[in-house]
Amino acid sequence: MDELNLRALLQDESFVNYCRRTEKEDIEKWEKWLQKYPEHQQSIAELKETILAMGYYAGEVSVQANYFRLQQQIKKHSNQNRFKEIGKTVWFKIAAAVLAVGTVSLFLFQQQAPKETIEIVQHIGSPGQDAALLTLKDGSVISLTDIRNGSVVALQGGVEIQKSKNGELVYKAVEQDGAAAAAVNKITTNRGNQYQVILPDGSKAFLNANSTLTYPLKFANDARSVRMTGEIYFEVAKMDRGTDGKRIPFYVETAEQKIEVLGTHFNVNAYQDEPYTTTTLLEGSVRVTSLKMNESVLLKPGQRALLSERLRVDDIDISQDVAWIAGDFVFKGEELGSLLRKISRWYNVDVECPQRLNKLKFDGMVSRSQPLSTIMDMLQTTGKVKLTLNGRRLIVID
């Protein structure tokens, strides 16, 4: 099988379904194809074996991220005899395909969970989804999952609220209304949900699980202010005042801090159960101010501000902080307690873990589209902990 065919198969959902025996229609389709082209049976069998050894998903992530992930998994595969042996030729072909396509991501885990475990975990600990509640200015609440993509959600204060064809919430001014500036909306994601909203000024906000964002229907001419809880990634649109051409600042407030922005990309983690409120800057510049201590720091790209009692700034590898935006969990020396809090929010489970285990550190990468069983397997292969799922209780023991 040449490389072009391999790349196509890795991106073909029907082929992955055939390998996993999940869709009858796809199974029949590929069995007929193999009957027609029997010369490819050996190559297909090898690729099928490879895919079955993987928690496989495709997503829009960078070529560099794909290469790094594949490199790490091949290294683990070659160094750990626990993994099922797969032909080197197949691995090299996959590596070439990933580098060429730039949109295929692979995660290899040690073994498939027992069938009965998979069924229970996927039912209870299935991955999160795009869903949110929108609270309008009159206090009424709309479930956005009940609104069809490409339709109007509401019209208030001269502003049309739409759910785009891609499922985003979009605000569009359709008429002048002075009352819009005083009216606010609030979007809320529960545990196991995430959502993206395009604000009235064109700025984008991507809410992680268990988060809220409160914002006006129309921003003021001298400043744009929003308030948040949980974790949100922002891409702030640059706006100038028409009178003097000065930039209109954008402010993000949490319970502990205020962030001033002129136009940039950054992530804010302000969960109440985290030891710090963190602000991670990807592009541009932001000023973070502690409301309690009245001290501030100016961040540069690649830096993170941590606020507890005092503010401090670290130069970091930002990939771990923003991996969730691309649909991944990335753990680089991450403590088990922090990792479990992320799992709890995304899979909507309650965690029980002895205090003595919280400081254990883990490395790894896995798609957020995978079921909870995949992460449980990943953690257990280290030999550091054992995990069981009882209803919505994830129990950790050593």
Image: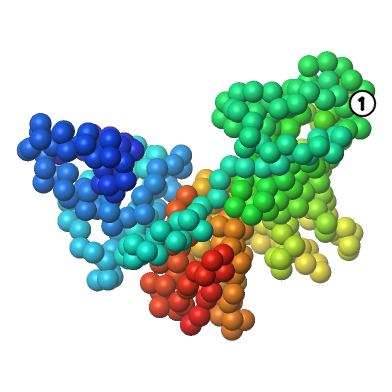
Q: Secondary structure at mark 1?
A: helix
Vertical order, 124 against 186 (above or below): below
Q: Is residue 313 above or below residue 211?
A: below
Q: Quadrant of residue 341?
A: bottom right
Viewer can see residue 75: no
Q: Quadrant of residue 216?
A: top right
Residue occupying image coordinates x 77% and y 67%: 308
Placement of the N terminus among the 4 image quadrants: top left
Q: Which residue is mark 1?
A: 179
Q: Nearer the viewer, residue 129 or 69?
A: 129
Q: Tell me which residue sits at (28%, 63%) in the image.
A: 77
| The furthest residue to the top | 175
Image quadrant where residue 256 sits: bottom right
Q: Is residue 62 above or below residue 158?
A: below
Q: List x then y, in percent, for residue 65.
A: 44, 48
Residue sitting at 70 percent across and 51 percent down?
A: 211
Residue 11 picture location, percent across and down: 33, 37
Q: Position of residue 47 (x, y in %)?
A: 21, 48
Residue 243 appears anywhere in the view: yes
